[in-house]
């Protein structure tokens, strides 16, 4: 079994900063891509940022404001969010593509989500 546990969400004022974290645990042989998605009320889930083997990609709406980073020793991915806007309000979900053993397929896992609210 593999679990992804997010932390660090909360309420922040416009222009403020917040960092969310996601730690993977369980039967992990190798973690490939790790990333963050978000879903606002009434909208579809969308990619925010993703990192894999040192390559990172960001959605256009967060470029220059958000930074994704990864600590492979801790199986943890972070999302540093700066210059937050009201439209960044959403539930942020962690995603990781993980192999649980040699010869086994890579599977996509999701965290439970953490609420980020940007409001004055």
Image (cartoon, rainbow, N blue to C red):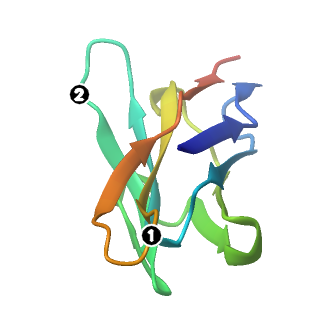
Is 26 on the left or on the right of 63, as rendered?
Answer: right
Q: Which mark is residue 117?
A: none
User: Furthest residue to the bottom?
Assistant: 54
Nearest to the eye among marks 2 and 1: give it: 1
| Residue 28 seen | yes
Q: Earlier in the sequence, mark 2 or mark 1?
A: 2
Residue at 65% across / 18% down in the picture? Answer: 119
The residue that disc 2 covers is 44
In which quadrant is the C terminus drawn? top right
Secondary structure, mark 1, is loop
Q: Is 81 placed above or below 92 here?
A: below
The percent coordinates of residue 63 (x first, y second) are: 45, 64
Identify which residue, 20 or 27, lies in the foreground. Answer: 27
| Residue 12 seen | no
Q: Which mark is residue 101?
A: 1
Secondary structure, mark 2, is loop
Identify which residue, 82 or 92, lies in the foreground. Answer: 92
The percent coordinates of residue 8 (x first, y second) are: 76, 36
The percent coordinates of residue 14 (x first, y second) are: 66, 31
Q: CA distance from mark 2 to mark 1?
A: 32 Å
Residue at 46% across / 86% down in the picture? Answer: 53
The percent coordinates of residue 102 (x first, y second) are: 41, 77
How dense is the environment of label 2, judged by Cα within 10 Å: few (below 14), some, or many (20 and up)?
Answer: few
Q: Is 24 placed above or below 53 here?
A: above
Q: Is 97 placed above or below 22 here?
A: below
- Asked where in the image residue 113 lies, by quadrant, the reply is top right
């Amino acid at each position: 079994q593999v679990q992804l546990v997010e932390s660090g969400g909360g309420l922040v004022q416009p222009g403020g900063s917040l960092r969310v974290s996601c730690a993977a645990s369980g039967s992990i042989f190798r973690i490939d891509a790790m990333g963050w998605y978000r879903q606002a009320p009434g909208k579809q889930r969308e990619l925010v940022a993703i990192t894999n083997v040192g390559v990172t990609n960001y959605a256009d709406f967060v470029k220059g404001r958000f930074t994704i980073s990864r600590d492979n020793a801790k199986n943890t991915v972070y999302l540093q969010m700066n210059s937050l806007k009201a439209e960044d309000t959403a539930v942020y979900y962690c995603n990781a593509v993980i192999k649980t053993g040699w010869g086994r397929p890579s599977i996509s896992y999701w965290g439970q989500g953490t609420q980020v609210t940007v409001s004055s």
